[in-house]
Image (cartoon, grey):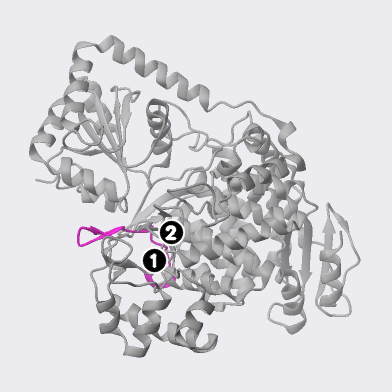
């Protein structure tokens, strides 16, 4: 019989709707029952693409005996971490405080008041590899709660107090200097793996935010070593098994240190962050390799991760047919069956497919050797190899389409959609891709038309239902995405919507001491009001809020945006100098705040050759320290909405560009070369 999850929209929660566990979703019903029956809460947090979440579900939550033990001793609550990042943040901090590490599935035991007293991640059904069996854990904790209640309550109170103290960092404006950027970059250089690229050792995560900061640092310093590190990392990632060589897109992380064996789940946010990173390196280098990775990744998102209405889906599972990675693995015989003999010979050599394989007897496609080496070995020219690989890729992709696909979590999360919106919008402008612009516009129209309740933003949508109060990251990420879309088509409705979201952040989330809480002032009361300044797999909402607010300040010159951004940077000041790999996005925001930002206003009819020439000159190279507005001289809506455009007449009836720095403006120009000179002047 279904439990209390059967009416949820989260695919992760619905995966557990038929468990014999009497699961509840987090909410008043479950919490009231725990209080009324004075039972501890067993809180299980995970997400639909999580391999070990599936393992624990199969081993324990589908086991009638273990489920009976859970039901007898606890009120059992299941949470999708992607829907409730506030709960995930609070209780992950508890797991880390108690165990020194974290991860999913997350298993936390709470008092009826929601205070944690014991926590862990995956527990096997019987004692294994030094981990206690889950039934043993359940028995011990139920007995402790019944027989040692005062000790449990005292422990829970101490841990809750510790979590609250840890989240209250003193402001440190002294950290907001260029020297902080240099020290952070030096710290990342020390973590760099010169052999395989990336930071640190296995398991190896792309850490897109840290690399995006180093791209900014290279732009500022022009230090060749930084660019070499960046390029080495981006090439080795894209050559490894973490990248899908047939369908495009990146997996979550590599289990080894050379990017070969991925944890096969694909997350929307990783592909948003990485496609934007590769896009910016393409701008810097002009190397078509980076453009190819961007386009393959975004094309994958359009093809496999976009709803008919234009929303972006959340994840693709690591498993198919109950096996991790099965969808992506190949044998030589499968390659040979799908391709003509000559193409099969090239494919086997190029993607390193062997009889022994590189993962459980089969092969994860990767590019273990330079293309030039493979071409020479096969007696082919570089062009002939590239053409053959392209044909083989298309044929193998078609063959793979006949397999059972991994599961897909089709819920829409506003924050993750904001990250992907930003990538599509920037790619549309930089790569001159009208189709990407259309994808971005459809997404914005859907989110703004479907996931709002009055002036409030909602967080998630699936199966015709939008619900849950949006959190800080939703407002911040989507505001940033809308500002990027504004610069992609200069439709003032996107600017106006971005500004409304920023105003919502200031009204609902601002901490008077500096920065922003993750939840709104009128949201559900939890054991603490989280305020994350460190990033996890995605940027912190605070970090993205800073740059969005600063951009709005330069468009409007309204001090409230600037002051909120500076207060947030000060709140993170102590972290910026100490935890470079955990505050990459905030370091990028600090870089923007310290720069002489170019405020560019272009007055000319969109679509006209002279206007488009000025816009192209503005967006060609990588310029992270500029904001751009454009409108026809008779577009009263745009001129009224965006103060940067006010009082800017055309010269000689031609499209005209104005470049200002801190409101000190240079002479207006109509020639793209003159505009380029102004934008590149020190």
The tag earlier along the polypeptide, 2 or 1, is: 2
- What is the spatial separation of the Cα atoms under label 2 and label 1, in whole angstroms? 8 Å
Q: Residues within 10 Å of mark 2 (few under 14, many from 20)?
A: many
Asked if the magenta segment contains residue 514, the reply would be no
Q: Quadrant of residue 303?
A: bottom left
Q: Which structural element holds mark 2?
A: helix
Whether tag 2 and tag 1 are in contact, CB under 8 A, the answer is yes
Residue 125 % position (x, y): 17, 37
Tell me the tag on residue 640.
Answer: none
The reply to whether residue 594 is in sight is: yes
Q: Nearer the viewer, residue 41 or 8?
A: 41
Considering the image in quadrants, where does the N terminus appear?
Answer: top left
Q: Residue at x 88, y 69 (%)?
A: 668
Left or right: 590, with 193 as reference point? right
Which residue is tagged 1?
305
Assign a secondary structure to mark 1.
loop
Residue 274 percent across, percent down from the top left: 52, 60
Could you say which is closer to the camera, residue 22 or residue 445? 22
Number of numbered tags placed on the structure image: 2
Q: Position of residue 365 (x, y in %)?
A: 38, 69
Q: Is residue 603 left or right of residue 666?
A: left
The residue range painted magenta reads: 302-324
Q: Residue at x 45, y 70 (%)?
A: 367
> Is there any visible trace of residue 491 in the rendered image?
no
Which secondary structure type mostly characterizes the magenta part of the structure? loop
């Amino acid at each position: 019989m279904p439990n209390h999850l059967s009416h949820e929209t989260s695919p992760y929660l619905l995966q557990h709707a038929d468990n014999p566990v009497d699961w509840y979703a987090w909410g008043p019903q479950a919490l009231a029952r725990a209080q009324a029956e004075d039972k501890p809460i067993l809180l299980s947090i995970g997400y639909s693409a999580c391999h070990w979440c599936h393992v624990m579900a199969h081993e324990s939550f589908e086991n009638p005996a273990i489920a009976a033990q859970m039901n007898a001793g606890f009120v059992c609550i299941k949470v999708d971490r992607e829907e409730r990042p506030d709960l995930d943040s609070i209780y992950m901090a508890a797991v880390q405080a108690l165990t020194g590490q974290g991860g999913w599935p997350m298993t936390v035991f709470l008092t009826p008041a929601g205070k944690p007293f014991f926590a862990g991640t995956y527990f096997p059904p019987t004692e294994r590899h030094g981990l206690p069996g889950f039934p043993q854990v359940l028995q011990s904790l139920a007995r402790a709660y019944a027989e040692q209640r005062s000790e449990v309550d005292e422990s829970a109170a101490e841990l809750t107090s510790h979590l609250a103290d840890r989240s209250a960092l003193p402001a440190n404006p002294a950290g907001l200097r260029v020297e902080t950027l240099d020290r952070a970059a030096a710290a990342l250089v020390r973590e760099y793996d010169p052999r395989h690229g990336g930071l640190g050792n296995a398991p190896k995560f792309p850490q897109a935010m840290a690399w995006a900061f180093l791209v900014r640092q290279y732009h500022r310093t022009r230090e060749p070593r930084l660019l070499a590190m960046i390029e080495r990392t981006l090439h080795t990632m894209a050559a490894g098994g973490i990248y899908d060589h047939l369908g495009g897109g990146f997996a979550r992380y590599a289990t080894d240190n050379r990017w070969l064996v991925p944890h096969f789940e694909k997350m929307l946010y990783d592909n948003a962050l990485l496609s934007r990173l590769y896009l910016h390196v393409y701008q810097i280098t002009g190397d078509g390799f980076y453009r190819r990775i961007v386009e393959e990744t975004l094309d994958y998102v359009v093809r496999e991760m976009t709803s008919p209405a234009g929303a972006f889906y959340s994840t693709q599972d690591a498993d198919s047919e109950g096996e991790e990675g099965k969808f992506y693995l190949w044998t030589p015989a499968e390659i040979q069956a799908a391709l003509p003999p000559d193409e099969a010979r090239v494919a086997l050599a190029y993607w390193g497919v062997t009889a022994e394989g590189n993962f459980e007897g089969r092969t994860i496609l990767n590019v273990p050797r330079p293309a030039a080496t493979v071409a020479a070995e096969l007696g082919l020219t570089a062009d002939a190899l590239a053409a053959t690989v392209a044909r083989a890729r298309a044929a193998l992709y078609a063959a793979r389409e006949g397999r059972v696909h991994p599961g897909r979590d089709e819920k829409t999360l506003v924050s993750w959609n904001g990250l992907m919106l930003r990538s599509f919008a920037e790619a549309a402008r930089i790569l001159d891709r009208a189709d990407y612009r259309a994808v971005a516009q459809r997404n914005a129209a859907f989110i703004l038309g479907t996931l709002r309740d009055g002036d409030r933003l909602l967080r998630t949508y699936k199966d015709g239902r939008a619900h849950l109060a949006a959190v800080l990251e939703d407002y911040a990420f989507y505001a940033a995405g809308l500002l990027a879309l504004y610069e992609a088509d200069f439709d003032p409705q996107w600017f106006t919507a971005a500004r409304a979201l920023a105003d919502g952040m200031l009204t609902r989330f601002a901490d008077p001491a500096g920065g922003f809480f993750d939840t709104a002032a009128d949201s559900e009361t939890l054991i603490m009001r989280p305020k994350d300044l460190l990033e996890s797999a995605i940027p912190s909402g605070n970090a993205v809020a800073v740059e969005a607010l600063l951009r709005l300040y330069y468009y409007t010159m309204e001090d409230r945006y600037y002051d909120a951004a500076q207060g947030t940077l000060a709140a993170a000041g102590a972290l910026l100098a100490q935890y470079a790999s955990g505050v990459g996005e905030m370091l990028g925001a600090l870089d923007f705040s310290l720069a002489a930002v170019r405020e560019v206003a272009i007055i000319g009819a969109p679509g006209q050759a002279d206007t488009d020439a000025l816009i192209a000159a503005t967006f060609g190279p990588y310029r992270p320290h500029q904001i751009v507005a454009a409108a026809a001289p008779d577009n009263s809506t745009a001129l009224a909405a965006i103060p940067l455009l006010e009082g800017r007449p055309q010269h000689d009836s031609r499209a005209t560009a104005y470049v200002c720095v801190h409101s000190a403006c240079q002479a207006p120009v109509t020639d793209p070369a003159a505009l380029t000179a102004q934008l590149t002047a020190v």
